[in-house]
Image (tube, rainbow, N blue to C red):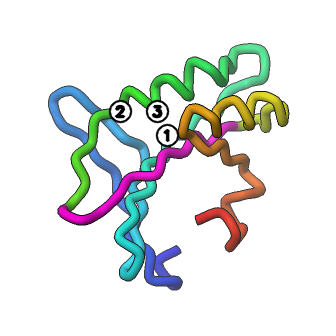
Amino acid sequence: LKDNNFNVMTYWDAQTQIDLLVTHNTDRLVRLIECRWVSSATLEPRQVVQEVLNKQYTPPPQHQVKRYAMLSPRVSPVTIEKAREMGVEILGLEDLLSRDVV
């Protein structure tokens, strides 16, 4: 990502911890990414999506926030669509190297 003019960082304050904040030098978009690497037996995607929505982060002036949950293992297409309707994009490990994601 750094080779493609992306800035990658983490964020925390007294109330919030965010796994990844990714920005690009030109698009004024902050990508808030929450990562979960768990077994399929313990993963509850809806709970993770709600956690992402509850994250409090104030972006720099004139920037927007786009919210993501990066989950392993991959979840069902129905879950991905429901999360998208709530304003959270679901990413899998295979998306990590895709140029079409951000």
Identify the secondary structure beneath mark 1: strand
Q: Nearer the viewer, residue 20 or 87?
A: 87
Q: CA distance from mark 2 to mark 1?
A: 9 Å
Give the magenta-colored segment's residue range: 61-71
Tag in front: 2 or 1: 2
Asked if marks 2 and 1 touch (Cβ < 8 Å), the reply is: yes
In the rendered image, the vertical position of residue 62 relative to residue 42, given as above or below: below
Identify the secondary structure beneath mark 3: helix
**Residue, disc 3:** 52
Mark 1 / mark 3, whichever is N-terminal: 1
Q: Amino acid at mark 1?
A: Glu
Q: Which mark is residue 42?
A: none
Q: Amino acid at mark 3?
A: Val
> Label 3: few (<14), some or many (≥20) within 10 Å?
many
Asked if marks 1 and 3 touch (Cβ < 8 Å), the reply is: yes
Percent coordinates x, y for residue 84 in the rendering: 64, 39
